[in-house]
Amino acid sequence: MNHTLAELQSGVAPAADPTVKIAVKGLDFFYGDFQALTDITCDIRDNAVTAFIGPSGCGKSTFLRCFNRMNDLIIGTKHAGLITLDGQDIYAPGVDPVDLRRRIGMIFQQPNPFPMSIYDNVAYGPRLHGMKKKADLDEVVETSLKRANVWKEVKDILGRGGLTLSGGQQQRLCIARVLAVQPDVLLMDEPCSAIDPTSVQKIEDLMAELKSSVTIIIVTHNMQQAARVSDETAFFLQEVMGEPAMLVEFGRTAEIFTSPKDKRTEDYITGRFG
Amino acid sequence: MRDMKRITNAAALSVFWFAGLTTVVLLGAVILYVFVNGIGHINLAFIFTRPHGVNAEGGIWPMIVATLYVTGLAMLIVTPIAVLAAVYLAEYAVQGRLVRTIRFAADTLAGVPSIVMGLFGLAFFVEGLGIGFSVLSGALALSFLMLPIVMRTTEEAIRAVPKYIRWGSYGLGATKWQTVSRITIPAAMPRIITGIILATGRAVGETAVVIFTMGTMIFTPVLPTDPGRSMTVHLYQMAMEGINLPAAFGTALLLMVMILFFNLSARWLLRRNRRMQG
Amino acid sequence: MAEGLRPDPMPEEREATALSVRGDAGTLKLVSKATYFKEAALKNLFLACAFMAVAAVALIFVFVGYRGWPVFTEVGASNFLFGREWLPTQDLFGILPLFVGSIVVTIGALLLGTPLAVGAAVFLSEIAPPKVRSVVRPAIELLAGVPSVVYGFFGLLILRPIVADLTGGLGFGPLTAWIILAIMIVPTIATLTEDALQSIPNGIREASYAMGATTWQTISRVLLPAAKIGIVDAIILGMGRAIGETMAVLMVVGNAPGFFRGMGKPLSTLTSQIVMDMPYASGLHRTALFGMAIILFLVSMGLVLTVRLLSRFKEEGL
């Protein structure tokens, strides 16, 4: 391990590189007695798209859910190691996971609009955080839906239930809902695995547009998608069932896909297993 | 050998058909009997006038008022407590001795015979707290009866809300209470209301609880502290004394219609909701 | 894995580490005291509501028990529980005949009702065409909601004369009570048994049919054994309903507080005797009625405990 205990306890990342948005140092993660992740260290770059790839059950989603402390919602989970956002320890005692989740938005595999109107879906976040005026809300709703590339399709049916949209539209509505609270980071947990191909195209375009203002981390099973959308790629692997997964290789996407350093990465990318 | 197998199978299946049909016929007979004998007696005067004379001729208006009053009040008392209790069990509770105790208590409460609940209401609300035979005492005792039913249906309703939807809310920086109050409970609302309606329907048909808490006096209650006689108690008294059977049939039919209305509206609500989300 | 918030750290802890978290807009916020206490207060409010169930059970036990206690001290527990005569006017408060009456009525109703209910459940779950099922199942559920006083009324006017023809006498007695109670518990047992059958994975049925088993063989050798704990649960709950049933029994059983003398001879049960005596009882007599209520309470609690123990067996795969 390349960091000292003192560094971990101080809660400050050792190197304050401004291009690093999230830094992870020696992260272990446990579900009860089962260790899911071991000794993960990596830097997530600001204003870039980072893809997490690897076979099913290799802990990519678990890792992703550490960034916004979504794992706190599962009883019996614990972690060791350090995760910093802009150099600050997100697991430091007293840090509000609720506020953290506002700053680090998340898109889930299954589109999950709330059972309310399209407008109320997008306005939900701003309302939570105290926005009350109709004019302000109208503006946020419109901007967010535009940024999520779904405004044209829904602008005349804002009062209709979010669940009446198609799967792909629902997913973009969920992206608009997250953008409405202006997060710095967007976590996407296999966002395209449950929707139709044309919507996948729209969401991939959207990621390219958004990355200038938002740091994006995407978990995907689709190698081509990772190669198309990401700047950096991390490959995870659980080598033995019941053992924790680890980060095998992390680097520029172009390098990972053309000249991986690790044999296991090469095997996975060329379709030898997984 | 082959034939034997086939014959056994056919014989067994016909026994099951018989069981299924007998059940339907038996239960249908009860309803049909009450319907056929009661329908002739139901008219506006029967519903909206007071009974008079030694044989309780005339209408059953005071009983209808007392029944709706006591069950409505019980519903108002039990709903907030039962719903919040279910929120605790479904959203906050961590498995442990406390939760096991609460669940065991709820199951026990659901199994308490209604006559025991009636005597308890008499000992505690009517005499102990000095509320007397009244709509309020009856409603409080009925709320004990309804509590476990509403708790269970509400907890199931909340648990049925997909966890993805909750995650969406937490992911936006909502606190637990914001998620519960703005997302989970509204999403579960149709099923929660269904549970409340079904429990109220059950309270409408209850006799042994209200006879010892609201009393048997024919009176149109206005204040919660007024006594009254429920439709079920009225039916019981007329049936046992063998007086005015037509009115007893009319009362029985009205009771069943009310309960049927409760059940069908609960079902309708559930189905409408399923279609909207489907 | 259970869902729910891990307890947040106390806000007091934050002073020590405040160094790492600056107060400006771009930095992580700490849990605000106001939010922390609001969330904690709400959680405790909900816990208090949930605890109402426990409080309710305790209140019932304490108040009914308190009213009934003198009968155990003044009449004596053995004279009360095992006394063979219930003659309040002569200060004889033996509830054994009433207790036996309750058991006779319950067991008879279960013997009549259970085969019918389980048969109907198997019919609904495994045999009935979907159209029939979609009509019959809700109908049975609706019938579970018919007030017991209506069943009693039906029994009094329809069943009683028929039974009178069969057994002689007026028709008040256990046989009438058995039939009416059996009809009443069928919906309870049938719906719960059907739930148990429906929860068996379809793969198990298919595996049995694939080996050439007939429907009957699949039902009798695979499905009923697989659902047996669920069915036993259903029967116990039906038993609870029968033993605690008051109005319907009261209206047809005849209310003669003696031992069982025949299917057509009047009998009395714990529940029916309470309602019969309560309006005029006073003093020790009234106390005895509360004592009977506490016995009923304990019996119903014992049944709930049994169901819980059974479900533990089910979890252990026995």
Image: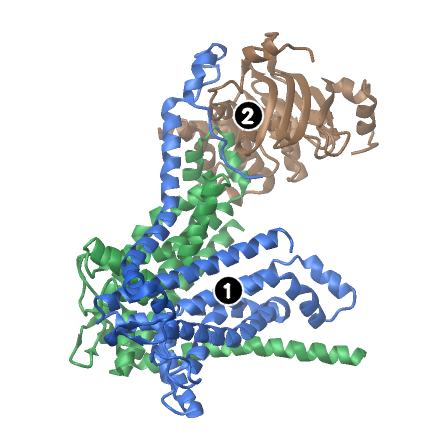
Q: From this viewpoint, is residue A78 visible?
A: yes
- Residue B15 position, x and y percent, is 62, 78
Q: If the image is split into quadrants, where does the N terminus of chain A sit?
A: top right
Element at badge 2?
loop
Tell me, what hue is chain A? brown
In which chain is the residue bearing label 1?
A: C
Q: Colour of chain C?
A: blue
Q: Is residue A127 above or below residue B247?
A: above
- Which residue was labeled with disc 2? A68
How many dots with numbers?
2
Image-quadrant location for residue A257? top right
Q: Are marks 2 and 1 in contact (CB under 8 Å)?
A: no
Q: Amino acid at mark 2?
A: Asn
Within-10-Å neighbours for mark 1: few <14, some 14–19, many 20+: some
Judging from the image, the colouring scheme is by chain
Amino acid on which disc 1 is placed: Ile
Where is residue B7? Give x, y as percent.
73, 80
Q: Is residue C154 left or right of residue C130?
A: left
Secondary structure beneath dot 1 equals helix
Along the horizontal axis of the image, is A85 left or right of A190?
Answer: left
Query: How much space separates mark 2 and mark 1, taking CA atoms?
Result: 48 Å
Q: Quadrant of the C terminus of chain A?
A: top right
Disc number for residue A107: none
Q: Are marks 2 and 1 on the same chain?
A: no
In the rendered structure, the answer to whether residue B95 lies left or right of residue B35 reads right
Q: Looking at the picture, does residue C182 appear above or below residue B129? A: below
Q: Nearer the viewer, mark 2 or mark 1?
A: 1
Residue in the picture at 32% in, 73% down = C273
Mark 1 sits on what residue?
C236
Colour green belongs to chain: B
